Image: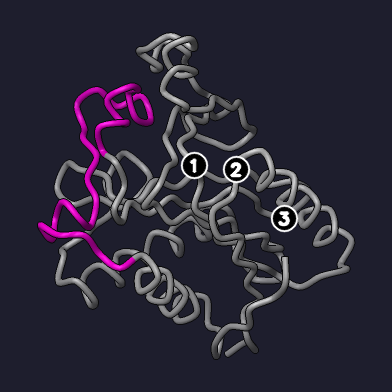
Amino acid sequence: MKEKLKVISLGKCHYKEALEIQIEMLKKRQKGEIEDTLILVEHPPVITTGRNASKSNIIVSEDYLDREGIELFETNRGGDVTYHGDGQLVGYPIFNLEDNNLGVRQFVEKLEQVFIDLLIKEYGIKATRHEKHRGVWVQDQKVVAIGIAVKHGVTMHGFAFNVNTNLEHFKLIVPCGLTEMGVTSVEQLEGQKVDLKEANNLTLKHFCMNFNYTGYEMLQS
């Protein structure tokens, strides 16, 4: 078992600001100035595109997004188009893969397992991997999106866990470019809103269990 996981909670934070913090932390981790750290955040509504994104998967105009107060950002993560917004828990692990004896695929699978375990054990929701598509699924509905980038052996970007997310906003895009698949949330599956703070704590609990930490320590951002 490793010692306590270092965690930075940004609360509600705009995507651009959180990205700047990620990049700063990434550089420090690459230099060995900090330990592996998990950043947790809730973003105001924003659509982000990955390296392999097709702009056609955003099915409304930028003017429409502006009017609705939804930002648009291009990123260097893997994957296509996704949405972040209120009621969604987003996590950015800044992890050195070599220090953890993990390859990229193993790291992503561990992230998936965090939420497979959480959903089954804490909410009684049978969640699984998909044989073709990354993330965590309840049948053909994605409840956790995962997309990372690796820079000189250190990860950035990460997961987006739909807790009480506004699923209507996903209709503005083709999520992850998958026309035949849907998106869900814990709220939709449970039929009622879920305490986001509790979901945050449960995520940390299962993250520590899957990545072999004894617990976690909250740091100042």
Which of the two discs, 3 and 2, sits closer to the camera?
2
Q: Quadrant of the N terminus?
A: bottom right
Looking at the image, residue 121 lies above or below residue 145: below
Q: Is residue 106 magenta?
A: no
Quarter holding residue 168? top left
Query: Measuring 71% from the left and 51% from the top, which residue is drawn there?
Result: 22
Q: Is residue 186 magenta?
A: yes
Quarter holding residue 35? bottom right
Query: Measuring 25% from the left and 64% from the top, which residue is drawn there?
Result: 194
Q: Quadrant of the C terminus?
A: bottom right
Badge 2: residue crowd in 10 Å (few <14, some 14–19, many ≥20): some
> Tag 2 or tag 3, which sits nearer the N-term?
2
Q: Secondary structure at mark 1?
A: loop
> Tag 1 or tag 3, which sits nearer the N-term?
1
Q: CA distance from mark 1 to mark 2?
A: 6 Å
Judge left or right: residue 72 versus residue 190. right
Q: Which residue is mark 1?
A: 44
Q: Are marks 1 and 2 in contact (CB under 8 Å)?
A: yes
Q: Which residue is mark 2?
A: 14
Judge left or right: residue 185 versus residue 34. left
Query: What kind of residue is marked 2?
Result: His
Judge left or right: residue 100 versus residue 142. right
The extreme left residue here reads 191
Q: CA distance from mark 3 to mark 1?
A: 26 Å
Q: Secondary structure at mark 2?
A: loop
Instruction: Give the residues in magenta.
Output: 167-195
Q: Secondary structure at mark 3?
A: strand
Query: What kind of residue is marked 3?
Result: Val
Judge left or right: residue 185 versus residue 139. right
Q: Nearer the viewer, residue 92 or 12?
A: 12
Q: Which residue is mark 3?
A: 154
